[in-house]
Image: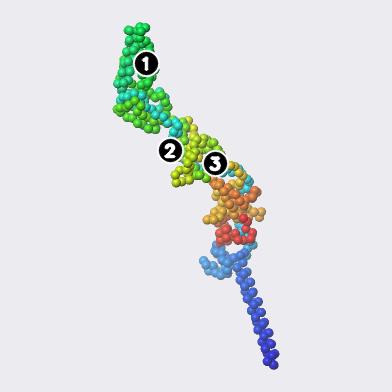
Amino acid sequence: MSIAKRYSVATIIAFVIFVGSIFLLSSCISMEKDDTDANVYYTCSMDPQVHEQHPGKCPICHMELTKVEMSPEDMNEVKLSAEQMRLGNIHTDTMKLQNVSDEKILNGTAVINAQNVQQISSRISGRIDHLYFKNTGEVIHKGDHLYDIFSQELQAAQQEFLLAIAKKKTLGNNEINYEDLMAFAKNKLLLAGMSEKQIEPLQSSGTVQLSVPVYSLVNGTITNALVHEGDYVNMGSELFELADLSSLWIEAQVYSNQVDMLHNQEYAEVKIAAFPNEIIKGKIDFENPELVAQSEINLVRIKVLNPTGKYQPGMMAYVVLRGKNSKSFLIPSDAVMHDSKNSWVWIKNQKENFEIRMINTGISRNDSTEIISAINEGDIVVTSGAYLINSEYTFRNGTNPLQGMNMPNMKM
């Protein structure tokens, strides 16, 4: 055989070997891709929680892993029997739009209405002989006996009144008008704190009272008692500070970005923490035009009626501000699954299986959460038992449900 022929045969053999190598390499790569198909996993019959992407042995019992092929739909769904749903207390609800209002709840405190505060002062100088109201919180009614006062000024005014009466009887003539003198002396007694009912027995008995009782002209609850038995007081000395608690202020703090809600309403709902089942309608009475120093907080006052006096200053309260109404979907907050970044619910599809649906949530209150995206009217959403479906998915697939978000049939 010639050298040229030998060279030609060698070239042909080398070419065949090269083509065969490429074919075998492509086959291997294809097999590797098949083995790592996203719809294929390997599990253990003894430990079904084991899920691997490659064949091998179970890391728990060391048995050979079994290959499992699933369609994308199967990978994303959970199928439960009627008995499983009953035992798991799994319930669903068909989504319908509901009225939802933008609502803000402010923390507040019941305080005394400063417009209802007044003082009881001494109307004459003297010594407090006996004090009948001594403690903060005691309720004073109009006409209550407050204290007895020993006052030389008041004794002199009584004597002046009796003297005017006596002179009228003995020296009455047309030159001096004793009626005017009597009226003047009587007026001094009234200004000193004596009442008409006290002056009448004075006039009839003709005897000066050494210690004169003083009665209240107003109603209120003592918020500050400033006098004690035996104290000497001057005319105008403050003895008691009273507050009418038939109405209170609820003072609450509102952030600057919530102030607009105050401008759109005259009234607000108030709940006193000690009476959680009662809702009070309060009138927005004052809004501080300035922010609290070094903060973004405003002060708002809501006036509430307190006719029975059961609400007391210092009680904690909550103020509910309502914004505009809108229509949205509401589901129980427990039906919404969360991780650090995402929220999702479980939807019952046409095959009676459960599939994951990524959602965006809105406001949450009263154990309900607003769903603002990815839910349509008529969707059947799991409202009870969502955690069990989540656990069932993880147990069967060995992954968190969100790991299926890259699959082509995942709904968002």
How is the structure coloured here? rainbow
Q: Where residue 132 sits: x, y (%)?
A: 35, 27
Residue 215 drawn above or below residue 73: above
Which one is in front, 108 or 233?
A: 233
Q: Amino acid at mark 2?
A: Gly
Q: Is residue 90 left or right of residue 127?
A: right
- Residue at image position (57%, 68%) is 54
Q: Which residue is mark 1?
A: 184
Residue 176 drawn above or below residue 263: above
Q: Where residue 387 sits: x, y (%)?
A: 55, 53
Q: Residue furthest front?
A: 175
Q: Amino acid at mark 3?
A: Met
- Residue at image position (31%, 24%) is 126
Q: Which residue is mark 2?
A: 314
- Residue at image position (64%, 77%) is 22
Q: Where residue 354 sits: x, y (%)?
A: 61, 55
At label 3, counting other C-alpha atoms closer than 10 Å, the crowd grade (few under 14, some 14-19, many 20 or more) is: some
First of labels 2, 3 by sequence position: 3
**Quarter holding residue 130:** top left
Which one is in front, 203 or 370?
A: 203
- Residue at image position (47%, 43%) is 291
Q: Which residue is mark 3?
A: 261
Figure quadrant of the N terminus = bottom right
* Distance between mark 2 and mark 1 Cα atoms: 48 Å
First of labels 1, 3 by sequence position: 1
Figure quadrant of the C terminus = bottom right
